[in-house]
Structure formats: structure tokens, C-alpha cells
């Protein structure tokens, strides 16, 4: 995660609200650049295909919004609620999400590049066939999330809950889970997904038991 940060200068951002987005949609505009949104309510709105560049969102509500094929470049979201939001096939680059709720959100086939999620709740979220490229997850809860057939490159985790997740067809080689809480994973037969994953001895025992192995210590 070193060597990048969102290209945002807070002093240059223009304060905006939900009505500004609605006006742009009515005019057929799809680009939003250099705007700062605070306490805005976007619940249920249709943002399909819009592009957000050099924007910040603070305490904004997106619940139930349609954000399919949106792009987010140099965007910061803090304390936002994206629960049950549809965000499939979206693109994220140089973005930070802090303290956000993504419970039940759908980001299937999303592409995340140089993205950091910190203190986010993503239980029951869907990331089916998503791509994670230099993504850092810190103190996030992914319990019961769908992470099937994901592509992971430079994915790092720390202090996360990765429990009862579906990881079928997601290669975990090089992913370090030693600083996170894992268990109850759904894997394909033979668990090829685990090849090359980095775990603690205790985590290895739990995973071995999931594979039907009997772990016995010497007397």
C-alpha cells in the first residue's frame, strides 16, 4: 500500500449535495469531479455508469442505490452507509473507505486497485468474481461474505473477521491471514484455494479439520 494516496486536495473541493447529482443526471451528465459531499442522502438513487473523480463523501447514505458500472478514482468515503447497495462491475482506484457499512452490498465483478478499507462492516456482502489489486483490508468484518472466484494480487489483511465466507475458486496464494480471524470457509473439493495461503499453526489446524483430517499431537 505504500507509494500511493488519493489525489485529493480538500481545499480545492467544491461542497455539493444530493440535488447536485440529480441535476447532473437530468442533464445527462455522467462525470462528477472535485466535489465534497457531507451528510447527503443518496438512498435509492440511480447512479448507473457515473464516474466520480477526486471526490469525498462523509456520513453519506447510499442504501439501496443503483451504482452498477460506476467508477471511483481518487475518492475517500468516511462513515458512509452503502448497505444493500448494488455496485456490480464498478471500478475503484486510489480509494479509501473508512468506517463504512457495506452490509449486503453487491460488488460482483468489481475491480479494486490500490484501495484501502478500514473499519468497515461488510457482512453478507457480495464480491463474486471481483478483482483485488494492491488492496488493504484493516479491521473489517467480512463474515458470511461471498468471495467466489476472486482474483487477488497484493491483497493484505490485518485485524479482519473472515468467517463463514464463500471462497470457492478464489486462489489465496500469498495472502497472509495470520493477523485476522478466519474459519468456517466454503471451499471446493480438495480445497485448492488454500495452496500458498499464509496462516498460523492454530489456523492450519482448523483448516485441516475442515478437510476431514484428524490432527493429533504427540504425547
Image (cartoon, rainbow, N blue to C red):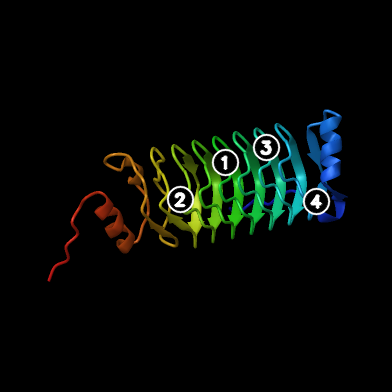
Mark 2 residue element? loop
Task: Pick whichever of labels 2 and 1 is earlier in the sequence.
Answer: 1
Give the residue drawn at x 46%, y 43%: 147
Q: Measured along the vertical axis of the image, is residue 159 above or below residue 2?
A: below
Give the residue pinned by disc 4.
Answer: 37
Q: Quadrant of residue 59?
A: bottom right
Task: Pick whichever of labels 4 and 3 is earlier in the sequence.
Answer: 4
Across and down, in percent, residue 89 comes to: 60, 33
Crowding near the residue tagged with mark 1, few <14, some 14–19, many ≥20 C-alpha atoms within 10 Å: many
Compare residues 195 and 168 and report the one nearer the observer.
168
Give the residue pinned by disc 2.
Answer: 144
Give the residue pinned by disc 3.
Answer: 66
Give the residue drawn at x 86%, y 55%: 11
Give the CA distance from mark 1 to mark 3.
Answer: 10 Å
Give the residue drawn at x 84%, y 31%: 26
Give the residue pinned by disc 1.
Answer: 106
Amino acid at each position: 500500500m505504500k507509494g500511493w494516496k488519493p489525489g485529493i486536495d480538500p481545499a480545492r473541493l467544491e461542497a455539493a449535495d444530493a440535488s447536485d447529482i440529480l441535476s447532473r443526471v437530468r442533464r445527462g451528465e455522467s462525470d462528477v469531479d472535485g466535489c465534497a459531499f457531507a451528510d447527503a442522502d443518496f438512498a435509492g438513487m440511480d447512479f448507473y455508469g457515473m464516474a466520480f473523480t477526486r471526490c469525498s463523501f462523509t456520513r453519506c447514505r447510499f442504501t439501496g442505490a443503483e451504482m452498477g458500472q460506476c467508477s471511483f478514482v481518487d475518492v475517500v468515503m468516511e462513515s458512509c452507509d452503502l448497505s444493500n447497495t448494488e455496485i456490480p462491475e464498478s471500478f475503484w482506484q486510489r480509494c479509501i473507505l473508512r468506517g463504512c457499512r457495506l452490509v449486503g452490498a453487491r460488488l460482483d465483478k468489481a475491480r479494486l486497485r490500490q484501495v484501502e478499507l478500514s473499519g468497515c462492516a461488510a457482512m453478507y456482502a457480495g464480491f463474486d468474481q471481483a478483482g483485488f489489486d494492491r488492496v488493504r483490508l484493516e479491521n473489517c468484518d467480512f463474515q458470511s461474505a461471498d468471495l467466489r472466484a476472486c482474483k487477488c494480487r497484493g491483497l493484505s489483511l490485518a485485524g479482519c473477521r473472515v468467517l463463514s465466507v464463500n471462497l470457492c475458486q478464489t486462489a489465496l496464494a500469498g495472502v497472509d491471514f495470520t493477523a485476522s480471524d478466519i474459519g468456517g470457509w466454503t471451499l471446493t473439493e480438495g480445497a485448492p484455494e488454500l495452496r500458498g495461503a499464509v496462516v498460523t499453526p492454530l489456523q492450519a489446524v482448523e483448516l485441516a479439520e475442515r478437510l476431514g483430517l484428524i490432527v493429533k499431537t504427540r504425547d
